[in-house]
Amino acid sequence: MSAQRPARIKGFADILSPESAVFTLLETAARSVFARYGFQELRTPLLEYTELFARAIGDETDVVQKEMYSFTDSKGRSCSLRPEATAGVMRAYIDAGLNARESVSRLFTLGPMFRHERPQLGRMRQFHQINCECLGSSEPLTDAEMILMLLDFLCEIGLNGLALKLNSLGCAECRPRYRAALTDFLSGLKQGALCPDCARRAATNPLRILDCKVDTCRELTEGAPKFTNYQCSACAEHFDMTLRYLEAAGTVFELDSRLVRGLDYYCRTTFEVVSGDIGAQSAVAGGGRYDGLVKSLGGPDVPGVGFACGMERLALLMAAPQTEPPVFFIAVADNSALEQGFLLARRLRHAGCRGIVASGGMKGLLRQADKSGARYCLILGQDEAALNAVSLKNMDTGQQSLVPQVDVLSILLQQGFL
Ligand code: HAM
C-alpha cells in the first residue's frame, strides 16, 4: 500500500514555471519603476502581534473579524500572519524612527499575505502583494504621484487598458457628519431589507454598505446621501487638486462614490484599478491616503498614502514570458565519462553559458536534449571520453562533428552564445 500523500492547504498554491517566471517579471518591473520614483525596499516579518492589525486595519473590518490566521504563542500573546503589508510597514517605520532620518519615506514591500477567505478565481488564502507606502507628505501631488507610479508599473508590464476608480472618504472632521447622515438614512429602510452582512454593518461600519455587491443593497442605497454634500472644504480642495494633477498627466479615471475600501485606516483619496477580464475579483490594485494611522499606532503625526497590487490577479492578465532555452545539453552515455561531463559543464557555466548535464541511455538522453530546447547536444560516450572529445550536435541542423573538449567553449563563443 502506498503512503498517503500530505495534502496542500486549501487556498495555498504552489507557483510552478512558467507562472513563477511571471512573478519574477512582476517583481523586476516593480523594482525598476519604483526606483525611478525614489522608493526603497523594506522587508517586514510575515508574523506580527494581532493587536497591530486590529488597531491599524480596524476591529470591525472583515479582515480582522473573520479572515486572519491567528494563534496564541507560548507566552499567551495572540500572533497573526499578515493579511496585508501596510500595518507592518507602519510598525517598522515607527520602530526604526525613520521620520527622524528623512522627511519623506518611500517604501515598497513584496511578498505573501494571508486571508482566510473563500477561495475562487483571483482570491487565494495565501496571495502576494506588491505594496508601496509614501510617508511624510500630505500634498495632493503625492496622491497623484502614487497613482501615476502604479499606472507606470502596470504600463511597464503591458497592462494599459485597466480602469482607474477614484473616491474621497473625507477626514476625521467631515466623515463623522456623513456617517451620521448615512446611518439616519439606513434606519429609515424596512427591517430585513439589507443583506445580513449589511444589516450588521449598519451599526458597525455603515459606509461599507455602499460597496456591497448584492443587487437589493445597491438599489436601496441609490438614494443615500452623497458624501460630496458633507465633505469639508479642505478635503474637497485636496481631492480637487489630486484630480487636477492626474488630468494634467493625461490620466483617464472614473469617480466612484461607492468606492469605500475594506480597511478602516483610509481618509481622503481612495482608488482602485479594476479589470473586466478576471471575473468577480476584479480589483488588481487598491489604495489610498491614511493620515493619522502612524499616530494612532503610537508614532509621530505623519501623513501617508499607498497602494498594493495583487500579484495573482496581475498574473491572470499576463502571458507567461518565453524562457531562454539552454545553450548546451551534455549527454553522458557512459559511466567512464561522468567526471569529464561534469567538469566540462562547470567550465562552460563559469564562462556564462546556460546548460544541463545528464547521464543515462543514449536514446533517452537525446530525447531529453531535444525536449530541453538546447542549441547543442554534447555527446560523451566511451569513445569520446577516451579522446577527451565530444560529439557536438547542432540541434537545429542535425550536423554532428567530433571536437576536442577544450575547443567547445570557443566554438560556442563563435556562435555568439555567450
Ligand atoms: P486591499 O484592497 O485589501 O488593500 O488589497 C490590495 C490588492 O491585493 C487587491 O486589489 C487585490 O488585487 C489583492 N488581494 C487582496 N486580497 C486578495 C486575495 N484574497 N487573493 C488574491 N489577491 C488579493 C490592501 O491590502 C492595502 N494594504 C493597500 C494599501 C497600501 N493601502 C495603502 N497602502
Image: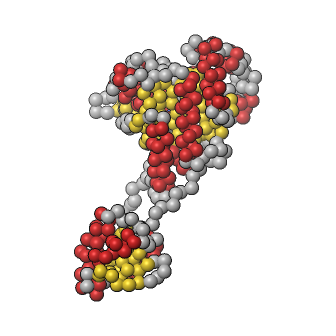
Tell me if residue 402 comes above or below residue 341 in the rendering: below
Q: Is residue 383 above or below residue 228?
A: below
State which quadrant residue 160 falls in: top right
Residue located 55% across and 14% down the image: 172
- Residue lying at 68% horizontally and 29% vertically, measured from the top left: 255
Q: Tell me the quarter of the picture where residue 408 sits.
A: bottom left
Give the camera-side residue of 213 and 235.
Answer: 235
Residue 367, image x, y percentages: 44, 78
- Residue ID at (58%, 39%): 151
The percent position of residue 271, horizontal first and vertical second, equals 60, 31
Tell how many labels: 0
Can I make out residue 367 in this image?
no
Residue at 31 percent across and 29 percent down: it is 76
Give residue 158's position: percent from left, percent from top. Answer: 58, 49
Quick check: 123 left or right of 302? right
Residue 101 visible to an observer of this rendering? yes
User: Quick one: quadrant of the N terminus?
Assistant: bottom left
**Quadrant housing the C terminus:** bottom left
Q: Is residue 334 left or right of residue 286?
A: left
Q: Quadrant of residue 211?
A: top right
